[in-house]
Image (cartoon, grey):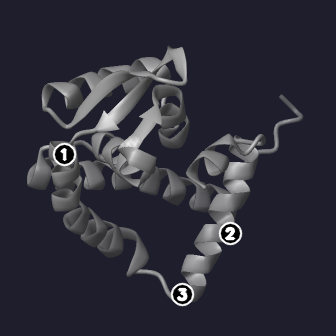
Amino acid sequence: MTDVRWLNAEERAAWLRFVGVLGLLPAALDAQLTRDEGLTHFEYYCLAMLSEAPERTLRMTALAARTNATLPRLSRVISGLEQSGLVVRMPCPEDRRATNAVLTPTGWDKIVQAAPGHVAAVRELVIDPLTPTQLARLGDICDRLLLRLDPDGRLLAALE
């Protein structure tokens, strides 16, 4: 244990604040979406990724990559969205082994309805408290952290 590089006071303070953001931000986003739309943030994110895809359709594996979810977790969430009539699963015409998730017209209406409130929450909680310089630095910081956490760049590539 003598090789451990313990955090100094400044590092510890930054780390604890970052952990606080990691804990509080998802709960705040979930609270707004649940209160206003009956969706979790992850459900909203799945619908949003489908809404931006060509023909509002993605292979389940591609949706898992874009949302950084395991296939079992994604499958459970998509099942719930299917029961609500927001998404349907269909065989992939290009690969019979694959399954596509498709945003239904009701799902499209739901994401269109939910987006303004979600964007307002994101602005209130993350964007507006920061100056343009701080926001640019936040983007740079996130890029550096993502490079360390996802050295193959799969998450960023899936989002492009």
Q: Which residue is mark 1?
A: 105
Q: CA distance from mark 2 to mark 1?
A: 37 Å
Q: Residue at x 57, y 51 (%)?
A: 159
Where in the figure is residue 72, as x and y percent of width and height? 43, 17
Q: Residue at x 82, y 37 (%)?
A: 4
Q: Residue at x 53, y 57 (%)?
A: 18
Q: Quadrant of the N terminus?
A: top right
Disc 3 is placed on an element classified as helix
Q: Which mark is residue 132?
A: 3
Q: Are marks 2 and 3 in contact (CB under 8 Å)?
A: no
Query: Does the image show residue 9?
Result: no
Q: Earlier in the sequence, mark 2 or mark 3?
A: 3
Q: Which residue is mark 2?
A: 140
Disc 1 is placed on an element classified as helix
Q: Left of 97 or right of it: where is 30? A: left
Q: Left of 76 or right of it: where is 80? A: left
